[in-house]
Image (cartoon, rainbow, N blue to C red):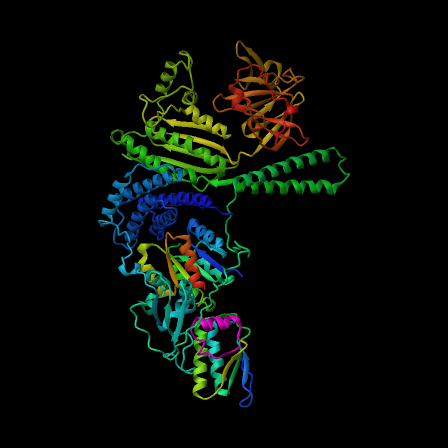
């Protein structure tokens, strides 16, 4: 059942969409991409925000939306032209509208009068002293109450053309009190001359009820222009001359039967889209996950059968597996959302921050339509905000400095999204000063993050800014110096199963590349065995696997073992010691080393007993089912019903090289 | 609507349709003109479910025209909906309903 | 039988408010987000009352009213326009196209029910 809370929620959701739309249309206007419908769409956005908001009594956003709507209406009628200052004003107005709406949504009162300045500016742009706040012309007589009323109702011939029906009007009058209805057929032509669709009859109604004149007038609200109407108080009305048809009619007192409440509601043949609770989708995702597991189990049983025993079964299982893949893709697609929802917040951020910093910056956004898991979209806002602030604060130079460097005064920040294979790539590129590696290295040494004698490659130096405790800002500014460093950004991105990379050229700018999984719920994994346990390695992280020779592995004092691969050394991490697994292969020449790529620790080699196979697994949260374990990203259920832990390679690389005693007790771990 | 009946003798008698709304007005007007050209008219109003003012105007116009020519115009067995509408529009004395 | 109402508005909030209010009053309500979709649906399945916004993409309210009035089956179906105060010219245009009545946004739910009852009988 729809409730008022639900309606409110719908309103705020829709208002957010409308604001996004408004920003997009304003951007189109400012970039000269305006189409035929741009101004109309803008108008409708403010119009709808106003219309819905009024119903909830949100007077302040409604007031502002009203002024903006009026202004757009003038633009629409070519009475005002769109100049840059008008656009800036509309942007500010839209920002303010967003704030006022947010205040209403969160139930906090916006600072009184905070919108006064922008209202004044908008009103003067519209060249109006006061936006006409429609006041119903006070009809003094409207409030008058009499003992009763004599109503003369003489429809014009065209009354029926608007589907107005005297029967309904007289019925509504009868609802106010006892009535006597007298019809006047004097204008009615004979049957051979009558126009069947014109109105000829008129009526005199005597209403014996002490109601206000306004109530009587209301009944005729829609036909007032289509009839002659007089409403006179009964006491000063002369007794009507007996008309030819004077014959009071006892009006049926029974109200027309109300529409049948039991009848099926909501029958809408039109629904192009439905709104579904995310919890319901997640349940579906889970169920599909269970299906995938069951299918894997069946496949495993089937594999143990003699090959030709039942060819039909084999074929059926193949088809099932294929359909399941499609079903899974379909269900996952329900969870996806365009990144637009988070991208659309960024232009305002850039505007405001650039304003604070006195910088001139244009944000170019592309690929807003790229779809990604809803959860990922929601969690992108913070990292993106941080990266953009960073680019504005540390990347883009002030206009004068840019000019001195021979760059255009206006800096450009590009924010783009695209899908490449099973991953989503988001890039934030600026044409600012780039990373000053000498300074970064000096800072890192100063902070003791790097030893004085270490020599680092360019990319290794770039990596330094992601270290906890690193901050290059000379002064902690109000913009990026919020105590949140790049390390937090990296952690957030990694928590989403993503990676972040930095490329930079001194004097030319920087580019941050975020690589994110399409979905958090399913993972392509490599199943490896360690002792009697199975672990899953994300395929995306795997570089290669090999069986080391004795001479490839060396002990490094204080750092455990490393493995030599084509001239470089990669730390070796035996999983069985890391997780305290008994009965695993201890001799690396008898096991397999899987080389995985981590973002900030380069490559590491994981020693496992054997490779079992590649499969798609359904990710279950370990935290939700047990507790958080470092180096473990989640868990899944294998085809044979065993629980397997999904390795978090970044976490593994960061761990100290000692056994973790608290590996989850499998017997007690029930995933659901 | 077709009118069954002969030129003389018993009144032509026909059934009023269930819907007497604006869309039905044109057809009703034609039927009434044809019927009136013949003889006395008797309508069976039992089936009427919905009535609108345009059709009641026509019935009243036909009744008046018939009276002018000295012919009979009757509506027999009027449905509840028809009776109510006629009363609500103040036409009870003008459109002859025979219950 | 419950009377059928269609609400046509590009604002989901508005549609849901109208639908919510009228369903509570026992009406059967369907929704459409613009004139084009409304027209198609109305031709496929008739309703007893149409409530339409005037400002909509694809096909605006006035055009919808005009098109509906051109359909024999919709000549006498009441059509209500949802307007805002500033919309006097639009309202007149809608009236000229054959709108039965109007409702000023934001509307009071009781007023909506009254008005629908007034035009639908």
Q: Would residue A177 be visible to someone looking at this image?
A: yes
Residue A181 occupies quadrant: bottom left
Q: Would residue B22 be visible to someone looking at this image?
A: no
Give the residue drawn at x 38%, y 23%.
A483
Q: Nearer the viewer, residue A183 or A410?
A: A183
Magenta span contains residue A329: no
Residue C111 occupies quadrant: bottom left
Q: Position of residue A155 (x, y in %)?
A: 36, 71
Q: Is residue A234 left or right of residue B7?
A: left
Q: Nearer the viewer, residue A622 or A6?
A: A6
Q: Nearer the viewer, residue A529 or A243?
A: A243
Give the residue drawn at x 49%, y 38%.
A372
Q: Position of residue B89 (x, y in %)?
A: 43, 72
Q: Nearer the viewer, residue A284 or A80?
A: A284
Region of the chain picked out in magenta, as a range? B78-99
In the rendered image, the vertical position of residue A244 relative to residue A596, given as above or below = below
Magenta span contains residue B81: yes
Q: Is residue A661 left or right of residue A103?
A: right
> Where's the C terminus of chain A, which quadrant?
top right
In the rendered image, the vertical position of residue A494 relative to residue B84, given as above or below = above
Q: Farthest residue in the bottom direction?
A: B8
Residue C67 occupies quadrant: bottom left
In the rendered image, the vertical position of residue C37 relative to residue A193, given as above or below = above
Q: Position of residue A429 (x, y in %)?
A: 38, 33
Give the residue drawn at x 66%, y 18%.
A584
What is the tally of numbered marks visible in this picture? 0
Q: Position of residue B56 (x, y in %)?
A: 45, 75
């Amino acid at each position: 059942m729809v409730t008022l809370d639900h309606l409110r929620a719908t309103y705020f959701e829709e208002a957010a969409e409308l604001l996004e739309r408004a920003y997009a249309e304003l951007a189109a206007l400012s970039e000269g991409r305006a189409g035929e419908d741009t101004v109309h769409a803008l108008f409708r956005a403010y119009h709808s925000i106003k219309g819905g908001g009024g119903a909830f009594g949100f007077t302040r956003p409604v007031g502002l939306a009203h002024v903006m709507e009026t202004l757009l209406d003038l633009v629409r009628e070519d009475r005002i032209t769109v100049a840059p200052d008008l656009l800036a004003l509309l942007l500010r107005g839209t920002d303010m509208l967003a704030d006022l709406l947010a205040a209403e949504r969160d139930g906090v009162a916006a600072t009184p009068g905070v919108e006064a300045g922008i209202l004044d500016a908008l009103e003067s742009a519209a060249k109006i002293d006061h936006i006409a706040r429609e006041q119903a012309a006070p009809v003094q007589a409207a409030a008058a109450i009499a003992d009763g009323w004599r109503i003369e109702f003489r429809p014009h011939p065209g009354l029926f053309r608007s589907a107005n029906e005297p029967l309904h009007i007289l019925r509504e009058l009868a609802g106010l009190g006892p009535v006597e209805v007298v019809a006047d057929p004097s204008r009615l032509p004979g049957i051979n001359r009558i126009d069947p669709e014109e109105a000829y009859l008129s009526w005199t109604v005597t209403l014996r009820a002490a109601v206000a004149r306004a109530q009587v007038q209301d009944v005729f609200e829609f036909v007032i222009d289509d009839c002659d109407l007089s409403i006179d108080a009964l006491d000063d009305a002369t007794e009507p001359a007996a008309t030819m048809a004077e014959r009071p009619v006892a009006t049926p007192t029974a109200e027309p039967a109300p529409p049948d409440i039991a009848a099926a509601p909501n029958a809408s043949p039109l629904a192009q889209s439905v709104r579904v609770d995310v919890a319901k989708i997640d349940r579906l995702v889970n169920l599909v996950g269970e299906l995938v597991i069951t299918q894997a189990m069946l496949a495993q049983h089937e594999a143990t059968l003699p090959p030709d025993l039942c060819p039909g079964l084999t074929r059926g299982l193949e088809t099932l597996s294929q359909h399941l893949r499609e079903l899974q893709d379909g269900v996952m697609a329900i969870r996806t959302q365009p990144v637009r929802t988070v991208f659309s917040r960024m232009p305002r951020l850039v505007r405001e921050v650039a304003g604070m910093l006195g910088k001139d910056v244009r944000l170019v956004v592309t690929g807003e339509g790229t779809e990604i898991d809803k959860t990922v979209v929601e969690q992108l806002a913070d990292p993106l905000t941080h990266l953009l602030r960073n680019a504005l604060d540390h990347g883009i130079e002030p206009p004068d400095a840019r000019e001195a460097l021979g760059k255009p005064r206006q800096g450009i920040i590009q924010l783009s999204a695209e899908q490449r294979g099973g991953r989503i790539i988001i890039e934030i590129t600026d044409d600012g000063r780039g990373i000053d590696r000498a300074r970064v290295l000096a800072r890192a040494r100063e902070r003791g993050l790097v030893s004085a004698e270490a020599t680092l490659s360019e990319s290794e130096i770039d990596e330094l800014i992601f270290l906890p405790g690193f901050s290059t800002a000379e002064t902690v500014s109000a913009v990026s110096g919020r105590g949140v460093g790049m390390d937090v950004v990296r952690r957030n991105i990694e928590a989403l199963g993503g990676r972040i990379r930095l490329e930079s050229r001194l004097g030319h700018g920087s580019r941050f590349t975020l690589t994110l999984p399409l979905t958090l719920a399913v993972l392509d994994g490599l199943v490896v065995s360690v002792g009697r346990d199975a672990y899953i390695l994300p395929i995306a992280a795997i570089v290669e696997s090999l069986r080391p020779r004795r001479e490839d592995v060396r002990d490094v004092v204080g750092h455990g073992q490393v493995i030599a691969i084509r001239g470089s050394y990669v730390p070796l991490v035996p999983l069985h010691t890391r997780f305290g697994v008994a009965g695993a292969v201890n001799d690396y020449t008898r096991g397999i080393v899987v080389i995985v790529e981590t973002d900030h620790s380069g490559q590491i080699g994981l020693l496992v007993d054997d490779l079992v196979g590649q499969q798609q697994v359904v990710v279950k949260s370990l935290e939700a089912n047990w507790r958080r374990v470092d180096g473990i990203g989640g868990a899944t259920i294998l085809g044979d019903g065993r629980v397997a832990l999904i390795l978090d390679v970044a976490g593994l690389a960061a761990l100290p090289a000692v056994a973790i005693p608290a590996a989850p007790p499998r017997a007690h771990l029930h995933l659901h | 609507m077709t009118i069954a009946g002969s030129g003389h003798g018993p009144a032509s008698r026909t059934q009023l349709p269930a819907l007497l709304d604006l869309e039905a007005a044109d057809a009703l007007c034609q039927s009434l003109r044809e019927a009136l050209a013949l003889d006395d008219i008797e309508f069976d109003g039992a089936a009427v479910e919905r009535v609108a003012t345009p059709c009641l105007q026509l019935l009243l116009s036909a009744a008046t025209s018939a009276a002018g020519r000295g012919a009979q115009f009757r509506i027999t067995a009027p449905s509840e909906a028809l009776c109510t509408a006629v009363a609500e529009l103040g036409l009870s004395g003008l459109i002859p309903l025979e219950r | 039988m419950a009377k059928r109402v269609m609400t046509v508005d590009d604002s989901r909030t508005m549609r849901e408010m109208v639908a919510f209010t009228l369903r509570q009053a026992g009406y059967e309500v369907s929704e459409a987000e613009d004139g084009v979709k409304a027209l198609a649906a109305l031709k496929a399945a008739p309703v007893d009352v149409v409530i339409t916004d005037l400002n909509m993409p694809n096909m605006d309210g006035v055009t919808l009213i005009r098109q509906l009035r051109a359909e024999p089956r919709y000549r006498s179906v009441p059509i209500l326009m949802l307007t805002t105060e500033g919309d006097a010219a639009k309202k007149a245009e809608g009236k000229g196209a054959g709108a039965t009545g109007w409702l000023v946004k934001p509307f009071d739910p009781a007023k909506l029910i009254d008005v629908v009852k007034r035009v639908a009988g």
